Amino acid sequence: MNSDLIAAAQQLQLMDASDEGESPGFDATCVRTHLNSLGVVPSVVSVDELYGALALSQNVDSMDIHQMLRVMLVQNDVLIRDAIWRRSSIPSAQQFQSPSVTSTSSSLLSSLTTSGGSSGSTPQSVHSRGESSASSSFQRLKIAPPKNFRCPLCPSVMNEKDFDRHILAWLSKVHKVGPVKSGHCPGIRDADHELLQRFPHGSVADRVGSLVADIRSLVRPGAYDSMSSSGSGRDVVVAARFAELMTPH
C-alpha cells in the first residue's frame, strides 16, 4: 500500500468517525507503530518533490472530483513527510540550494493528471530571468566628466576635480629650482610672472597663494554638475579669469 492510499484510508476513517459523532484522537506512538508495521517510513522530501506537488494544482479546473481528491492527498502526504523529516533530523545544506525541477517532479505530475502538459517556466528559469532583469536594471554606466579645464602654464587639459588639484600643486613648486621634467607643470617661480601682476603684496609664495585661492574660488570640484557628462561650464569662467589676470594692469 503506497503512502497516498494510506492517507486516503486515514481520511476515510476520520470521516466515518465524524459521522458517528466520535471525536477522533491520535496517539503519536500508536500512529508511528502502525505506519512502521505497514512498511511506511517517512523519508526526506526534496525541493523538486515539493515543487512537483505544488504543480499538481495548476490544472485544477479541468479535474473531476476524484482527481482533485487524489491531488490533495498526494500534496498532504508530501507536506506531512516533510514535517516529520524536519522534526526528526537536521536538514542538510543541499535541501536549501536553488531548486531545479527534474524528472522526479515531471513524472509525478504526469502520473497524477490526465491532461497534463507544461504550463509556464520552471522555477529555475524564472529565477534566472529574475536575476538577469535585476542585474540589468541596476547597472549604471560610469561616464567620465569632460576635460574642459586648461592649465595656462602647461599643456595639461583636465576635468574640474583634477584641475583644482593641479592648481593647488602650484604652492609646492614655488621654491623648486632646476629644470622642469618634460610633461610636468612648472608652476610659478618668478616674481615677475604675468599671472602675479594683480597680486603685488608679499613674497612670491604669498602672491602665488593669493592667485591659487582666487582661481580655486571659481571651481566646485565636489559638485554634482562637475562630474556630469556635460560638465559644469565653470571652465569658461576660469579661462576668462586667466585672460583677465594676464592683461597688462
Image (cartoon, helix red, strand yellow):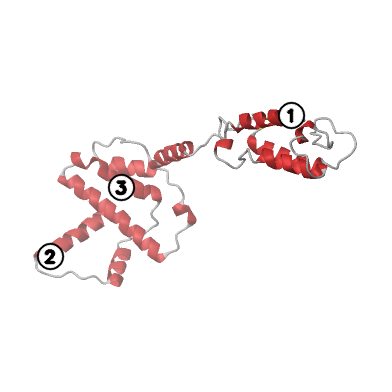
Question: Is the residue marked by circle 2 packed among few (<14), some (14-19), or many (20+) residues within 10 Å?
Answer: few
Disc 1 is placed on an element classified as: helix
Instruction: Say if mark 2 contacts mark 1, CB within 8 Å.
Output: no
Q: Which residue is mark 1?
A: 246
Q: Which residue is mark 3?
A: 54
| Residue 157, quarter of picture | top right
Q: Quadrant of the N terminus?
A: bottom left
Disc 2 is placed on an element classified as: helix
Q: Amino acid at mark 2?
A: Ser
Q: Which residue is mark 2?
A: 18
- The CA span between labels 1 and 3 is 81 Å
Q: Amino acid at mark 1?
A: Met
Q: Residue 158, how many percent across, how many down?
A: 68, 32
Depth check, front residue: 116 or 174: 174
Q: Amino acid at mark 3?
A: Leu
Q: Residue 153, how many percent across, how many down?
A: 77, 30
Which of the two discs, 3 and 2, labels the residue nearer the N terminus?
2
Can residue 41 be seen at all in this image of the molecule? Answer: no
